Amino acid sequence: MELLNEGYEIICVDNCYNSSPDVLNRIEKITSKKVKFYHDDILDAAALKRIFSENKVDAVIHFAGLKAVGESVSIPLQYYHNNISGTLVLCQAMKDANVKNIVFSSSATVYGLPKSLPIQENFPLSATNPYGQTKLMIEQILQDLYVSDPGWSISILRYFNPVGAHKSGLIGEAPKGIPNNLMPYVTQVATGKLPQLKIFGNDYPTPDGTGVRDYIHVSDLASGHSAALKRVLSQTGIDVYNLGTGKGNSVLELLHAFEKASGRKIPYEFVPRRSGDIASCYADPTKAKKELHWETTRDLNEMCEDSWRWQSQSSGKTSD
Ligand code: UD1
């Protein structure tokens, strides 16, 4: 929507594995603009060839990936196939169509256990699960692609913890099954769909003992993509950017902000730490501010208010 409002023409390619095509109707309702939609998979080379031949594409924003850490441990082959092979097929189709501008969704998960905080883009990288491995491997593939042909223009965006929803309450996150991530879990406790939140650990070396993360509003994340797109359209090169607020909030802080925003009590209990979790993680967003001229503008209260509006308006609907 950010890009539509800025006047770009958008083509959406989605296999709808984790989303619903109905989202497009809502986007049209909000923006009064049309999105051209292909219900296709990026693993399908023939489909991509057709899409690139039917349209004059200037740049690709590549979000197509499976993203659940726990699931990636159970079905690693699907994760590697979808995320890695999908990216290879996409990049080959782009190369064949001579489209060499790409913005890629990576994740702060590539920092593993950070050596210090806040996290800068040049910190050492590591992965502890197949999902994280796919992000790291794709970053490497894009680096190698750029070395092979400096005509490419590549922006790698490392997201911290995206939460929130569109202000309208029409578009938000609707995970299948029981949510793994904190915010969707909290919103489902607030509606009574889930009985209580389990807080994974209260003995971390953080101010209140619960895990600290850099929560970023999805609309700030969207404007980060618009900023990255402008950069890839205006110059060649490969760059990596943290997309975060630079501020860490604990699980309890988020929970209390959500209670305030929703006017609902969120019952919770402390349970042992979740394996693979780290104590604290937050970004140094200076590079994005300097080079993309982008920074976040929405605070934790706004993230909670928008998540709640979406959740309370969307019962029964599915979306992404
Ligand atoms: C997780 C993924 C990360 C991925 C990101 C976005 C793991 C280990 N990491 O990040 O790779 O990029 O999602 O999809 O899954 N928490 C609770 N109770 C809950 C859920 C979460 O206490 O029911 C706590 C966690 O311990 C953590 C914080 O809330 O301290 C945030 O958790 P979550 O939303 O799952 O995000 P991450 O683990 O940071």
Image (cartoon, rainbow, N blue to C red):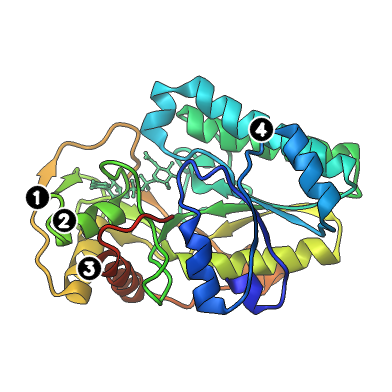
Question: Cβ–Cβ below 8 Å for labels 1 and 4?
Answer: no
- Kindly report which numbered mark, 1 or 4, lies closer to the viewer in this rendering: 4
Mark 2 → mark 1, Cα distance in angstroms: 6 Å
Q: Quadrant of the C terminus?
A: bottom left
Q: Is residue 71 left or right of residue 192?
A: right
Which comes sooner in the sequence, label 4 or label 2?
4
Q: What SS does tag 2 mark?
A: helix
List x then y, in percent, for residue 227.
67, 69
Mark 3 → mark 1, Cα distance in angstroms: 16 Å
List x then y, in percent, for residue 296.
51, 73
Q: Say which residue appears at 48% left-offset and 22% top-offset.
A: 76
Determine which of the numbered discs, if any, sits on residue 195 in the image.
Answer: 1
Q: Is residue 139 left or right of residue 230?
A: left
Q: Is residue 152 left or right of residue 203?
A: right
Which comes sooner in the sequence, label 3 or label 4?
4
Question: Cβ–Cβ below 8 Å for labels 2 and 1?
Answer: yes
Q: Residues within 10 Å of mark 1 (few under 14, many from 20)?
A: few
Q: Quadrant of the N terminus?
A: bottom right
Mark 4 vs ligand 1: CB below 8 Å: no
Q: Which amino acid does the dot numbered 3 rest on?
A: Phe
Q: Which residue is mark 2?
A: 189
Determine which of the numbered discs, if any, sits on residue 258 in the image.
Answer: 3
Q: Is residue 107 above or below residue 285?
A: above
